[in-house]
Every structure is written in C-alpha cells, then in structure tokens.
Amino acid sequence: MSDLKDLAQFRIFRHLTEDQLNTFRQAVRIKKYPADDLIFQEGEVGDSIYLLLDGKVEINQALTLQLSKGSYDTREKAIINLTSDMHPVFGEMSLLGDDDRRTATVKAMTVCSMAVIMKKDLFSICESDPLLGYQVMKNVANIVTDNLVKANQNVLKLTTAFSLVLEK
C-alpha cells in the first residue's frame, strides 16, 4: 500500500469517518527509505508519528549496562520486526509527555514507504475538531497502553528467567 486509501487500517485512525480520514490525508507526507537506512534513532528529538505503508522495519533499543565507573556497554537489541501488512504506527511516545525523545531506533530492513504526520499538524487537526481529536488521542492511548503491557510482560519474563539462572 503505497498510497493513503487504506489509512483506516491503522489503529490511530480507528472509528474515523472518511471525511475525518481525508483531513489527515492532507497532512501526511510520504517518505521513502532505502533498505538499512535509519528512520530515527533512540534519543533523538521526536516531532512526528510514522505509519508503515510498505516494507519491513526493525525496532531496536540500547541495552545500556554500566561495566565500571564511567564505562558503559550500549549495544542495541532488536525488539521487534514490523511489516506493512501489520499496519504499524510508531513514534507515538515522543508525541506525548514532557520528554519528546525517541525511545527506540527504527531501521528499514527493506525499501520502506512511510506516511509521516508532524506533531504540530496532528495536534492542530485534533484541536480544530475536538471530537476527531478525542477519538485519535483515545486511539493513541490504546496503542501506548498495549505497548506498555507488552513491555511489562517482557520485563517479567526476563526477570523470571534471570532469577531462575541465579538459583542454579
């Protein structure tokens, strides 16, 4: 899907009318990324949200570990691979809260086409139409909540595995 006709497939736009979707279609920029290109990097200031239209991306996070005083190991660990048929939305964390830093690195695994919505455009649309804004922010809250639940489950699994290893 390299065009925007199926925008309703993305969770951020659930329950929107065709007219409401058209409002967002006007605000979207399409960006292409070659394979192995960084889309954004953990720690960068984030000012946009991304929708994967075509391709496959890998999401990584730094595994920062203090080895000694002032010495850190900051290798990255792949967290998840996402494909366009999953209709993923990412970059939402930098739109919310006081710290607008990216919480992960996103890398194109194949040639990718992205729909990019700038933070200022997203909030401008939401402020100009409060009912539309409410639905979109509710959808963003659902995405963030689901991601947090998954992250908590992963932490619990890792903590349990680590505890089992230490018991032996």
Image: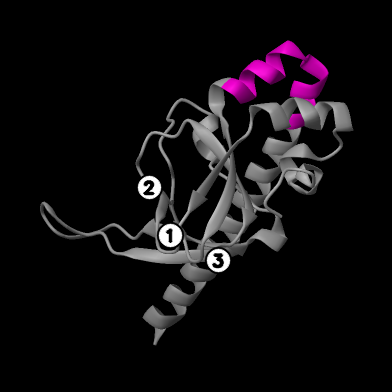
Front-lying residue, 108 or 150 = 108
Residue type, mark 3 in image: Asn
Sequence order check: which comes first, mark 3 or mark 1? Answer: 1
Residue 146 location in percent, x, y?
67, 50
Which mark is drawn over residue 12? none
Residue type, mark 1 in image: Asn
**How far separated are the C-alphas under marks 3 and 1?**
9 Å
Q: Residues within 10 Å of mark 3 (few under 14, many from 20)?
A: some
Left/right of residue 165 with respect to residue 5 in the rendered view: left
Q: Name the quarter where the N terminus is drawn.
A: bottom right
Residue at image position (70%, 60%) is 86
Task: Check if mark 2's residue and mark 1's residue have beta carbons within 8 Å.
Answer: yes
**SS at badge 2:** loop
Instruction: From this view, report whether residue 80 is shown above or below residue 30.
Output: below
**How far separated are the C-alphas under marks 2 and 1?**
8 Å
**How far separated are the C-alphas under marks 2 and 3?**
16 Å
Which mark is drawn over residue 42? 2
Residue type, mark 2 in image: Glu
Left/right of residue 52 with respect to residue 15 in the rendered view: left
**SS at badge 1:** strand
Residue 120 location in percent, x, y?
55, 21
Q: Residues within 10 Å of mark 1 (few under 14, many from 20)?
A: many
Which mark is drawn over residue 60? 1
The number of discs equals: 3
Residues in magenta?
A: 121-136
Residue 116 location in percent, x, y?
57, 38
**SS at badge 3:** strand
